[in-house]
Amino acid sequence: MGSKPMVSARSRSISATHYAAALLGCSTLAGMPLAVAAQDDAAPSGSQQTPAPVPDAPDAAPVQASPTPAAQQEGEIIRTISVSGAQRLEPETIVSYIQLRPGDEYTPAAADLALIALANTELFADYGITFNETTGVMVIEVEENPIINRIILEGNRRVDSDKILPEINLAARQIFTRSRVRADVARIIELYKRQGRFAATVEPQMVMLDQNRVDVIFEISEGPKSKVRQINIIGNEVFSDGDLRDEMVTQEDSIFAIFSSNTSYDPDRMAYDQQLLRQYYLTEGYADFRVVSAVAELTPDRRDFIITYVVEEGERYKFGDVEAVSQLRDFSSEALSAGLVMSAGDWYDAELIDNTVEGLTETAGAFGYAFAEVRPRISRNPEDRTMDVTFTVADAPRVYVEAIEINGNTLTQDKVIRREFRIAEGDAFSSLQVRRSTARINSLGYFQENFEVEQVEGSSPDRIILQANVQEEPTGQLSLSAGFSSLESFIFNGSITQNNFRGRGQTVSFGVNYSRYSRSGNISFTEPKVFDRDIAMGVDLYRQDYNNGYFDRDSATYEQATTGIGLRVGVPLTEYISLLGRYRLNYQEITLDETQFFSDFDGDGIRQCEPLIAGRYLCDAIGDRLQSIVSATLTYNTLNSGVRPTRGTRASATVEVAGVGGDTQYLRGRLNASRYWNLGSGFIGSVSVEGGYIWGWGDDDVLLTERFFLGEGQMRGFDIRGLGPRVVRRFYIDENDDGVLDEADLLDIGDDRNQDDALGGNAYYMARAEIEIPLGSGARELGLRPSVFIDVGSVFDVQRPTLTQSPLPDGLFLAQLDGNGNQVYTQLVRDTAGVVIGSTTTLSPIAPDGSNNTRAGTQLTPFVEEFVGDSISPRVSVGFGVNWNSPFGPFRIDIATTLLKERGDETKLFSFNVGTQF
């Protein structure tokens, strides 16, 4: 029997040789043409080649085979099917992809369908089918797609790889297909569009490796962030374009919006702006307002967008008949109607309606109707352009608290949260008490910001479950703060505080302070609920060393060391009022350098503080004292948060008495108050005022160390103890070396070479106003919270000191006397060769060799003392600051300048502090 011809069908997408060259040459994948070829050529040896129109790429759409004369011929029977070229796939698996089986009739149409089935698997770079009519053997020839070795991103600077890789489907050890590459390119571009970068492009590349592996590289050109170049509004006649743009979240790109992220184009934000426009018009009475169209056009350079709104304002409406209808038995319709804030004839305001619905709902909730529904019904009267509004308070059962559930707390004990609830299980529901409970839990500072107590329906319609689903935040604080002062140079403060010690709500803290004028340390412990009762107790141990050597500790006029212990007891009197009692026992030491400030000028043999050198106030203050101090503080607090309040009031009054035992007697009083407002649109305003006065009794006036001081730490823009009464000792310096001292040689009062001692005051007042400014979402993600502020204050009322002026040109010489009042002299001691080898003291003005001895004493540089700053006149400073939740902890910087100050005040430009949490 003669041999029958061999029939074959093969995909002609690209040859294996060309494909390998493309891989090794890093050919670009995007936009590669899809070629579909069908061939109907006679084989040179007499064999008949069957046409096989197959997609050039595995992801191409299936192509139907065209009937040919060969397809109409009677086929042969397939006896066996084999696979050639398979590497990773089993032959049985490849055969399972097609419909042909041994025993089936082989026809060109059946071969075409088999090739299409192989193409749809997206597993092969090349594939074909041959059939030997003589033997009945059909061979499936395949070349498998490569395996992805790794995915590489290049050029992505603005978007991290960690954000891109989860968006794409390709991954290492997957089979490479160009359809998936194109899909991933589209996903990456869409990701950049969501970031506002509409000019971004992605070019996929691939590098062929051994063992049929490939690296896929996405070359990303991010392009600039697309901004909103212009916002056009067409059709508005009542309100200007500027007024309407102010109501939108989206802003035009300008130098004034440099810190805002709302200048980038965002389709979702654009849709929200349309709602804001409608809301604005509805609050102004334009009930028929509508946005006809909103179009965002990309500029020709593909960098920015131009947004155009076409609006239709319509007519302005007023309120018509307004009433409230109550279906609750505890509320009368007449009383509710009388309490409505709008009345007939007022301009229509949709926001006022929403606020009224909220207010009526809260009123019903305060009386136990948690599920009371308030439905406003609005009737439009186009003829007289009025809107009739009826508020219906639907009937609802009175609700009781079935259970209070605490979820999410892993460290904090349940009782710490439960004791802050102002409502208990079984009580009638009250929205006011729930809101107050939320505020108290927020004030703990243990949980997520803006925590809310959730309300869930209970087992019956008249039961409700309150859920506190908390997310615990770090309650330990490791704070490091630093500042720079023109007088002190560097200031450092550090503290470690755990506000939720062992999850029991206890506070333990340790702090240290170091600067050129102050060193201190303290340890404290607070138990907020003693025996789970509303009694707080605490104990403090502290030590503080202070000196006024601003330039150098060695130049300090005096040093003060205070060691003490304090006990605290606090009890709540009402929901918002509490009383705190405190007792402190201090051992205080105030010393001066005796070699500089002590003398025996009166000749009695006792060295004493010399007021001409140290000043009368310091000479009066030196010594060791035991202070026994009792104080009481009455506090009113409605703040919604103790960590970062946004609304509420806090006021306190403190009375402090020293003299129940001890060596110091005085009465001190202080008042302070703070108020916070949510100004809307993210702005938070705050105002605080405070003041105090101290009275001394007994033989002593109020000591220097007990007076009030103001400056950095209280008033920004001024240095530490930088304002208020002070004595400035101005020295004469002969800078022109003419040998004559006169007024021209007297140093200015602000010269650092002068001696400057702050005296403090018996009275002070201070006020500050601050507005926190919201930034865009990008800045909020960084934790930036800028603010502007103004500080006003003064410290005053101190007894005028006795001032001293030394004579010119020699200055003031304070002679040293012995116990009998005789002048002491210094006599040089010489050896036999006449070389000075030492000195000794004597009462003789003449040395044995006939030379004059030197008078012993202190020679003071010529000076004039001035008493300045004792004025009730306000000092004023303004500035701005920024809070930043940086990666290394909370950071605050303030820059302030003084608008009003008095002669002698010390100013300061900026300060900063930084810390962290654990």
Image (tube, rainbow, N blue to C red):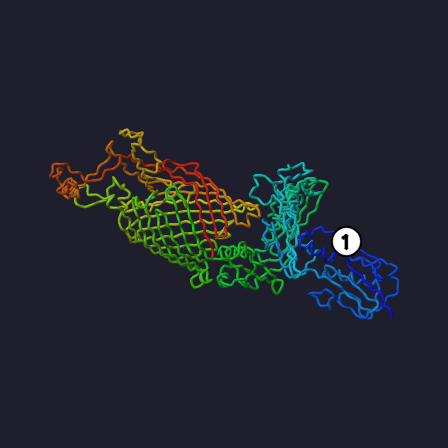
Q: Nearer the viewer, residue 1 or 388?
A: 1
Residue 691 in the image, given as x and y percentages of width and height: 40, 44
Is residue 824 at least partly visible in the picture?
Answer: no
Number of dots carrying numbers: 1
Mark 1 secondary-structure assignment? loop
Q: Which of 187 and 845 is in front in this view?
A: 187
Is residue 910 at least partly visible in the picture?
Answer: yes
User: What amino acid is at disc 1?
Assistant: Ala
Residue drawn at the location 48% of the way across and 61% of the way down: 416
Left or right: residue 313 compared with residue 601: right
Residue 22 in the image, given as x and y percentages of width and height: 69, 54
Query: Which quadrant of the figure contains the N terminus?
Result: bottom right
Left or right: residue 367 compared with residue 821: right
Residue 867 in the image, given as x and y percentages of width and height: 32, 36
Above or below: residue 416 compared with residue 274? below
The residue that disc 1 covers is: 35
Left or right: residue 918 compared with residue 749: right
Left or right: residue 739 compared with residue 673: left
